[in-house]
Image (cartoon, grey):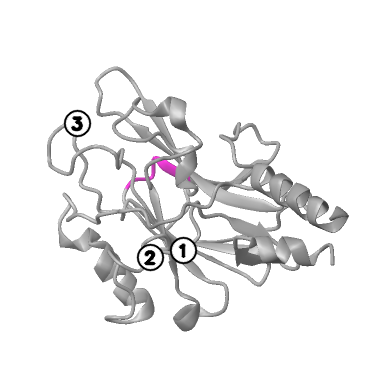
Amino acid sequence: MRHLTRAWAALALFLFASPVLAAGPFPAIVGPSRDGSLHDLQRKIDKLVGFGRIDVNRDYIGARPGDPDPWYWVNLGTKPITVQLVDRKSPRGTLGWYADNGRAPIIDGMDDGVVVEEWKLRGSRTSVRLPATVRNFGFYVDYKSNSHGSGTKLYRYFSNRMLNDCGPEGAGAMRAPYDGDPQMLVYDASRWLGPDTYIVACEYSDSGCPIGNGDEETDNDYSDMVYIVSGLGTTPAKGASFARVKAMFR
C-alpha cells in the first residue's frame, strides 16, 4: 500500500510539474499566401525533403491523435543545437529560444537568448548551447509591424501553442497557458535530413483570426519564417504514462 501511495503522489507531482498533454489533435489550416506561390509552404518543404514526403496540412506534430501537445524540446546537453534560417519574408522578424516551464516566459536574457537577428541572411546557421539548468525549451519569434499607422507594434509568439492567446488578438488571454493558437508548426524531418531534425514554420499574423485578405484577417500561410532545428542534443518531449511512474517504486 505504501508503494501505491507513493506512486500516486509521484503521478500527482508529474501532472503539476509538467506541461499538459492534450488528449486529441489540434487543427491548423495552412492557407494560400498573399504574397504568391513563391511563399507557398508546401513548395518550400518539398525543396528541403523531396516532393510528396511531408504534407504541410496533415504531418505537423499535433495533427494526429497521440501526438504530443503542447510541443517542446528536451535539452540533453550533449551537443549544441543548430538552427538554420531557411527563409524569412521580412527582416523585422527575430528568433530566439526560451526555457519552457509551462508558463509564459519573461524574455529578459535570463533563461532565453536570441538565435536569428534581423540582419541574418537566408541559409545562415547558428550554433547554440543551452545552459545545463534548462531542461525543456522552445522558440519564440518577435515581429515588428508598422501596418497600424500608430508606430511599431511588437508581436511575440511561442512554439508551445499553449503560451499564445486563443482566438483573435486579445481574446482568450486569461486562458493561457491552457490553450492557444498554433503560431509555429513543427515537422519531423529526421527521415530525410538526419536524426533529431525538425522544420519549423512560423505565422506572423494572429492565426486565431479568420483566414482572408482583410485587415483583421490572416492568410495563415505559415511561411513568414521557416527554420530548421537539428542536433543530437535535442529530443522531442514525450509524455510519461502512469505505468512508468509506478515502475519507479517497485
Q: Which residue is mark 3?
A: 216
Mark 1 and mark 2 residues within 8 Å of each other at the beta carbon: yes
Say which amino acid is labelled 2. Arg
Mark 2 secondary-structure assignment: loop
Mark 3 secondary-structure assignment: loop
The residue shown at (33%, 82%) is: 50
Q: Nearer the viewer, residue 242 or 50?
A: 242
Say which amino acid is labelled 1. Asp
Q: Which residue is mark 2?
A: 64
Q: Nearer the viewer, residue 157 or 74?
A: 74
Q: Farthest residue in the right direction? A: 2
Q: Farthest residue in the top direction? A: 150
Whether the magenta-drawn stretch holds residue 222 is answered as no
Report whether 75 appears left or right of 103.
Answer: right
Quadrant of image for the N terminus: bottom right
Residues packed near mark 1 inside 10 Å, few (<14), some (14 to 19) or many (20 plus)? some
Q: Earlier in the sequence, mark 3 or mark 1?
A: 1
Residue range (magenta):
90-94
